[in-house]
């Protein structure tokens, strides 16, 4: 019989928890290592939608990307996800930044979806090995943004750095904070999930095309990849990918 410890130890080999960022909270967050596991659910976020699925499917362990407990909690009320998980005997392991930087993890999956070649790990002063950088066929900012939109099925926002694009850095989720360093390296474009107005403004001034394709859109594709890795190692266990709706909706004023 498999236990939570078996899954934790396997995840620790492919995305070591020791590599998480200092502000992160990856690892076993709810439950116990000795609990037995017959059914596992994998999902990007644990919210009411996905938690209800997990409870109805009677899963024993949920492996999430984003931590269900992230900041310090001062209470543990019966309407909170962590309380409901404990109440239903479900353990939770979060993989977050370890899986972002892992080989075959979030950023490798994103680079692959964008057909980048000669992909390498990219380290900056602020980020040690989290990002990836590779090459695309020479193109311009608008055409490349349209390509990203198609590949990720995403509504993108972008700024034009004013030069042809050949080298591309990728960071799933929120990676625009690295834009200045990436521009200083001479890289042509950065694809990430979220970016603020002033990050676009600075990127354009620094000659970097910055493309924000959505937090969900840049990270969720890696969930099915993670589930596949788990199925390959735990063939006797039922591994389920929970269905999650993108919490962000888009309204185009031109359609009204």
Image: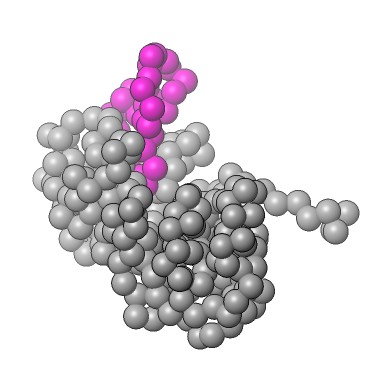
Query: Which color mode does the image show?
Result: one colour
- Seen from the viewer's position, the closer of residues 230 and 141 is 141
* Residue under the point 24% across and 30% down: 31
Q: Residue at left 64%, top 68%?
A: 160
Percent across and percent down for residue 250 are 70, 51
Residue 87 drawn in magenta: yes
- Front residue of 58/16: it is 16
Note whether 225 is above or below 44 in the view shown.
below
Indicate the position of residue 252 as horizontal and vertical percent values: 78, 55
Q: Is residue 254 left or right of residue 99?
A: right
Left or right: 25 in relation to 221: left
Q: Position of residue 57 (x, y in %)?
A: 38, 42
Q: Quadrant of residue 15?
A: bottom left
Q: How many marks?
A: 0
Q: Residue at x 31, y 72 (%)?
A: 120
Magenta region? 62-91
From the viewer's perspective, is residue 83 above or below residue 201?
above
Q: Position of residue 82 (x, y in %)?
A: 37, 26
Q: Is residue 86 above or below residue 120?
A: above
Q: Is residue 240 visible?
A: no
Q: Quadrant of residue 254?
A: bottom right
Please name the predominant secondary structure of the magenta segment in the image.
loop
For the N terminus, the image quarter is top left
Outermost residue to the right: 256
Quadrant for the C terminus, please.
Answer: bottom right
| Left or right side of 183 for 13 | left
In the image, is residue 119 part of the stretch drawn in magenta? Answer: no
Seen from this angle, which residue lies furthest bottom?
A: 137
| Camera-side residue of 227 and 68 | 68
Residue at 33 percent of width and 64 percent of height? 122
Regarding residue 167, the answer to whether it shows in the image is yes
């Amino acid at each position: 019989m498999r236990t939570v410890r078996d899954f934790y130890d396997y995840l620790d080999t492919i995305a070591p928890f020791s590599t998480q960022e200092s502000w992160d909270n990856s690892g076993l967050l709810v439950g116990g290592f000795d609990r037995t596991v017959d059914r596992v659910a994998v999902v990007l976020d644990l919210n009411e939608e996905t938690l209800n699925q997990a409870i109805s499917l009677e899963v024993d362990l949920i492996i999430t990307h984003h931590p269900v407990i992230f900041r310090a909690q001062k209470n543990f009320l019966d309407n909170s996800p962590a309380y409901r998980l404990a109440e239903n005997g479900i353990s939770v392991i979060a993989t977050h930044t370890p899986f972002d930087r892992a080989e075959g993890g979030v950023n490798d999956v994103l680079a692959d979806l964008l057909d980048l070649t000669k992909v390498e790990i990219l380290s900056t002063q602020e980020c040690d090995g989290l990002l990836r950088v590779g090459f695309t066929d020479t193109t311009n900012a608008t055409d490349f943004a349209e390509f990203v939109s198609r590949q990720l099925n995403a509504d993108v926002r972008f700024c034009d750095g004013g030069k042809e694009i050949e080298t591309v850095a990728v960071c799933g989720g929120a990676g625009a904070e690295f834009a200045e360093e990436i521009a200083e390296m001479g890289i042509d474009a950065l694809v990430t999930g979220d970016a603020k107005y002033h990050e676009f403004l600075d990127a354009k001034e620094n000659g970097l095309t910055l493309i924000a394709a959505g937090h969900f859109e840049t990270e969720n594709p890696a969930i099915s990849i993670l589930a596949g890795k788990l199925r390959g190692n735990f063939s006797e266990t039922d591994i389920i990918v929970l269905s999650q709706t993108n919490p962000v909706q888009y309204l185009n004023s031109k359609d009204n």
